Image (spheres, grey):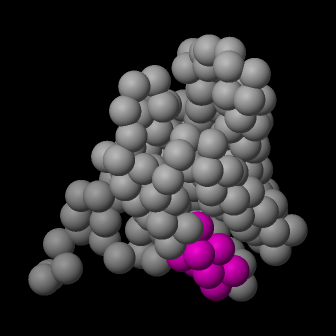
Amino acid sequence: MDSQNIFKSAITYEKKIRDLYLSAVDTIDDDRGKDFFKALAKDEQSHVDFLEYSLENMASAKEIDIEKLTTALSPSVEDDVSRMKKKIPEQMLGDIKRALNAALALEVETSQFYKKSCDNSQGPVKEILKKFYEIEQAHVELVQIQLDYATGNGYWFNFMETDMED
């Protein structure tokens, strides 16, 4: 698959995830959940914007500035985590879990797409795809953290928080 087709496919993935997050904003009544999904939707839109910019530059044989590929999400999610630790009302928890499960599945699928595309690319395109893969992996971890908390399975930041044998 050539670079332009890879980027066009990537736009499809990014729009699908962005739209899922935007629909979650409309579904979730909890402001903390809304803020979380809005931040992720904004980040995914920035990915769409970068990919569209990259396609334009490819078409005119211009160089792509990889520094324009950024993430709006902080690598440290302590503020979000401390806000989410407050009890989520039971009636909203089901919607949040469904949205997070769907988000996790799409983030994993997108991350795998970038990994496979990166493995089959070279040069500057490979570097761009590698950076996308790293960003999407961070999204996978962030969504997994929120899902672990929402389901109360005893994990927090992918570590066992409570001893389930007691």
Residue 109 point in image, percent of width and height: 48, 66
Quadrant for residue 63, please give it: top right
Q: Residue at x 69, y 59 (%)?
A: 12
Does the magenta-highlighted stretch encompass residue 160? Answer: no
Q: Which residues are magenta?
A: 94-103
In this rendered view, identify the residue nearer to me: 36 or 30.
36
Residue 99 point in image, percent of width and height: 65, 74
In the picture shown, does residue 45 fall above or below 158?
above
In the picture shown, does residue 94 fall above or below 63?
below
Residue 76 point in image, percent of width and height: 46, 33
In the picture shown, does residue 48 fall above or below 75?
below
Residue lying farthest right?
Answer: 26
> Quadrant of the image for the C terminus?
bottom left
Q: Residue at x 24, y 58 (%)?
A: 159
Residue 50 point in image, percent of width and height: 69, 32
Q: Main secondary structure of the magenta part?
A: helix
Residue 165 located left or right of residue 66: left
In the picture shown, does residue 127 fall above or below 109?
above
In this rendered view, identify the residue nearer to me: 93 or 8.
8
Residue 8 located left or right of residue 30: left
Q: Residue at x 67, y 50 (%)?
A: 8
Is residue 135 among the parts visible in the rendering? no
Q: Residue at x 46, y 24 (%)?
A: 124
Quadrant for residue 112, please give it: bottom left
Residue 45 located left or right of residue 47: right
Is residue 2 among the parts visible in the rendering? yes
Does the magenta-highlighted stretch encompass residue 97? Answer: yes
Q: How many marks?
A: 0
In this rendered view, identify the residue nearer to me: 62 or 159.
62
In this rendered view, identify the residue nearer to me: 109 or 123.
123
Residue 28 located left or right of residue 104: right
